[in-house]
């Protein structure tokens, strides 16, 4: 049986980029075009990173996996004969290609791939290092898609509370990042 075909989404780069942003995987609107072009990207750059003084044109933007998993379900990458580990070497090379001002890992998959650590909720807003050389500064943040998923359930009061808590925590993390960068 022939494997279904998939597209590789190219990274977004800028001449003066100094931050490496690593997301999870491209979504429907980004498939084969570029990372973080949709709603998550808008939230990431316009609502969060801007408060840390990190603008899109200072970033090299990539994903843990440059292929959109069927229906965005990572386990279904296997339908293409792929898995996260198939791209691990590429990701390591990007992380170690130069000294980044910071490597910002967005969400659990990116956190795990770069640091070998899990649990983004307890690590968010802290400063870590890469798992291969311990030389790159790695800053984990919660994926804005988490907020958007909650947003859809906004009617429910308890979900509303969670959105507010997450947003406040993420904005606090951006202040921390701004502070860390100012100390350089
Ligand atoms: N788009 C991306 O490119 N990456 C994500 O993690 C989410 C949306």
Image (cartoon, rainbow, N blue to C red):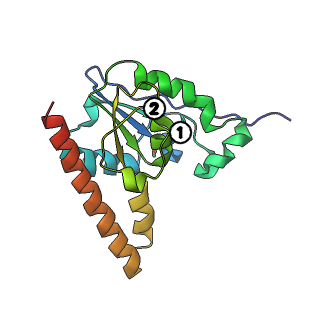
Residue under the point 61% across and 51% down: 73
Label 2 beta carbon less than 8 Å to ligand 1: no
Is residue 71 visible from the viewing direction of this image?
yes
- In the figure, is residue 168 to the left or right of 104? left
Q: Position of residue 4 (x, y in %)?
A: 74, 37
- Picture layout, residue 25 above or below residue 8: below
- Identify the disc placed on residue 31: 1
Q: Position of residue 96 (x, y in %)?
A: 41, 21
- Picture layout, residue 30 above or below residue 122: above
Q: Residue 36: which quarter of the image?
A: top left
User: Callout 1: few (<14), some (14-19), or many (20+) C-alpha neighbours within 10 Å?
Assistant: many
* Of residues 103 and 33, the one drawn nearer to the viewer in this rendering: 103
User: Callout 2: few (<14), some (14-19), or many (20+) C-alpha neighbours within 10 Å?
Assistant: some
Is residue 37 visible from the viewing direction of this image?
no
- In the figure, is residue 64 to the left or right of 137? right
Q: CA distance from mark 2 to mark 1?
A: 29 Å
Quadrant of the snapshot with the N terminus: top right
Residue under the point 26% across and 30% down: 58
Please, which residue is most extreme toward the left here?
182
Q: Position of residue 89 (x, y in %)?
A: 55, 24
Which secondary structure, mark 2?
loop
Residue under the point 77% across and 35% down: 3
Q: Position of residue 12 (x, y in %)?
A: 39, 29
Of badges 2 and 1, the one in the foreground is: 2
* Of residues 2 and 128, the one drawn nearer to the viewer in this rendering: 128
Q: Which of disc 1 and disc 2 is earlier in sequence?
A: 1
Ligand 1 occupies quarter: top left
* Of residues 75 and 56, the one drawn nearer to the viewer in this rendering: 75
Task: Name the residue carrying label 2.
Answer: 131
């Amino acid at each position: 049986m022939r494997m279904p075909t998939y597209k590789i989404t190219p990274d977004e780069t800028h001449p003066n980029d100094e931050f490496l942003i690593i997301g999870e995987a491209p979504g429907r609107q980004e498939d084969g075009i570029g990372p973080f072009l949709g709603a998550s990207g808008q939230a990431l750059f316009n609502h969060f990173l801007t408060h840390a003084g990190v603008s899109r044109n200072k970033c090299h933007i990539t994903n843990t996996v440059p292929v959109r998993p069927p229906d965005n379900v990572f386990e279904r990458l296997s339908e293409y004969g792929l898995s996260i580990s198939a791209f691990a070497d590429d990701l390591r090379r990007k992380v170690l290609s130069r000294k980044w001002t910071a490597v910002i890992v967005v969400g659990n998959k990116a956190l795990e791939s770069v640091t070998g650590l899990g649990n983004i909720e307890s690590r968010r807003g802290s400063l870590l290092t890469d798992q291969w050389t311990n030389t790159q500064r790695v800053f984990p943040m919660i994926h804005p898609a988490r907020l958007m998923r909650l947003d859809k359930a906004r009617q429910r009061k308890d979900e509303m509370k969670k959105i507010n808590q997450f947003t406040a925590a993420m904005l606090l993390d951006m202040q921390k990042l701004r502070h860390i960068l100012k100390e350089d």
